[in-house]
Image: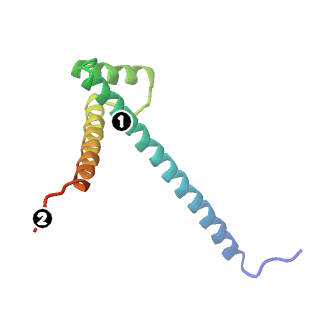
Amino acid sequence: MTIPLNPQDDFNEITQLIHAARQRAVQAVNTALIELYWQVGQFISRKIEQAEWGDGVVAQLAEHLARTQPGLRGFTSRNLFERYGVSIAIVLDLIEGSLRQFDIRKTT
């Protein structure tokens, strides 16, 4: 059995592999959370737009989540309304960008 000349180099390479895997895991979790927040915002937006929900129902949802999902963070009434607002803002930006493509007015 031979002992490597400098095992520290090998150890550092393994440490880098671990670090890279952790970074990929964090990115995957962040992506999943952003998708979740978007879906929640869209759901709330749709319910409010169809006049099925009002402010009180969103507060009740926040209470329900706190009660049924112990330890879940980020789903307070305020945060839920922010997600709703963000989803509306993104949709409006997309619509505005699409409309700009069809703008035939001259800008000169």
- Amino acid type for the residue under numbered disc 1: Gly
Q: First in sequence: mark 1 or mark 2?
A: 1
Q: Is residue 58 above or below residue 72?
A: above
User: Callout 1: 10 Å neighbours few (<14), some, many (20+)?
Assistant: few
Q: Say which residue label 2 marks.
A: 107
- Amino acid type for the residue under numbered disc 2: Thr
Q: Residue at x 49, y 53 (%)?
A: 27
Q: Residue 9: name its quadrant.
A: bottom right
Residue 41's spot in the image, x, y percent? 33, 34
Task: State the quadrant of the N terminus.
Answer: bottom right
Q: Residue at x 13, y 58 (%)?
A: 105
Which residue is nearer to you in this view: 24 or 93? 93
For marks 1 and 2, give the one nearer the viewer: 2
Q: Residue 69: name its quadrant.
A: top left
Q: Residue at x 30, y 18 (%)?
A: 60
Q: Is residue 93 above or below residue 64?
A: below
What's the image's color scheme?
rainbow
Task: State the quadrant of the C terminus.
Answer: bottom left
Which residue is nearer to you in this view: 80 or 45? 45
Residue reaching furthest left?
A: 108
Which residue is nearer to you in this view: 106 or 49? 106
Residue 76's spot in the image, x, y percent? 31, 30
* Marks 1/2: CA–CA distance: 44 Å
Tally of numbered tags: 2
**SS at circle 2:** loop
| 94 sits left or right of 24 in the view | left
Residue 48's spot in the image, x, y percent? 26, 24
User: Callout 2: 10 Å neighbours few (<14), some, many (20+)?
Assistant: few
Q: Say which residue label 1 marks.
A: 74
Residue 74's spot in the image, x, y percent? 35, 36
